[in-house]
Image: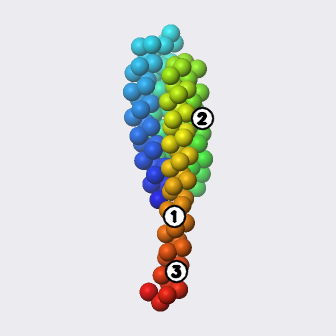
Amino acid sequence: MTARLAAATLALEAFVVFFATLVAATLSDAPDAAVWAAGGGLSLACLLAAGLARRPGGIVVGWVLQAALVVTGIWVPAMFALGAVFVAVWAWLLSVGRRIDRDRAAWAADDKGLGG
């Protein structure tokens, strides 16, 4: 469940980053090409990381992308707040996913121990 929740969060984040890139292209003083390279690259990286969530190191890649999202606040200050929200959601969903995985494993072990 942890990997599923991580993948869903990263996929949603990819769309949010894309739409934030549209805003940044309008509001930022940075050249449009640079904004699109950074925003588009981060959005694509989130989609690719969603596919890697089940693999070893996939969650670490997700954490790196969370940090990268917060850093984009240098160019668009509102991204500090949005990045903080996604870091909180990411951490919470990883916690919930791990708890569900642990409970499922315990339930499966109990079920096997009862002859079921």
Separation (CA) of disc 1 from disc 3: 14 Å
Characterize the local packing of mark 2: few (<14), some (14-19) or many (20 or more) Cα atoms within 10 angstroms. Answer: some
Give the secondary structure at mark 3: helix
What number is the disc on residue 4? none
Q: Mark 2 or mark 3: name the one nearer the start of the chain.
A: 2
On screen, 80 above or below 8? above
Name the residue: 45% across, 49% down: 7
Separation (CA) of disc 2 from disc 3: 39 Å
Q: Which residue is mark 2?
A: 67
Horizontal side, residue 15 vs residue 101: left or right: left
Residue 41 in view here: no
**Three-letter amino acid code of the residue under disc 1:** Asp
On screen, 66 above or below 37? below
**Three-letter amino acid code of the residue under disc 3:** Asp
Which label sits in the foreground, 2 or 1? 1
Separation (CA) of disc 2 from disc 1: 25 Å
Location of residue 47 in the rendering, given as x and y in whole percent from the top left corner: 44, 41
Residue situated in front as seen by the camera: 4 or 50: 4
Location of residue 101 in the rendering, given as x and y in whole percent from the top left corner: 51, 64
Name the residue: 48% across, 19% down: 35
Give the secondary structure at mark 2: helix
Q: Quadrant of the C terminus?
A: bottom left
Characterize the local packing of mark 1: few (<14), some (14-19) or many (20 or more) Cα atoms within 10 angstroms. Answer: some
Q: Mark 2 or mark 1: name the one nearer the start of the chain.
A: 2
Q: Which residue is mark 3?
A: 110
Characterize the local packing of mark 3: few (<14), some (14-19) or many (20 or more) Cα atoms within 10 angstroms. Answer: few
Location of residue 110 in the rendering, given as x and y in whole percent from the top left corner: 52, 80
Q: Which residue is mark 1?
A: 101
Name the residue: 54% across, 40% down: 88
Which label sits in the foreground, 2 or 3? 3
Tell me, yes or no, whether the two marked residues, 1 and 3, touch with CB atoms within 8 Å.
no
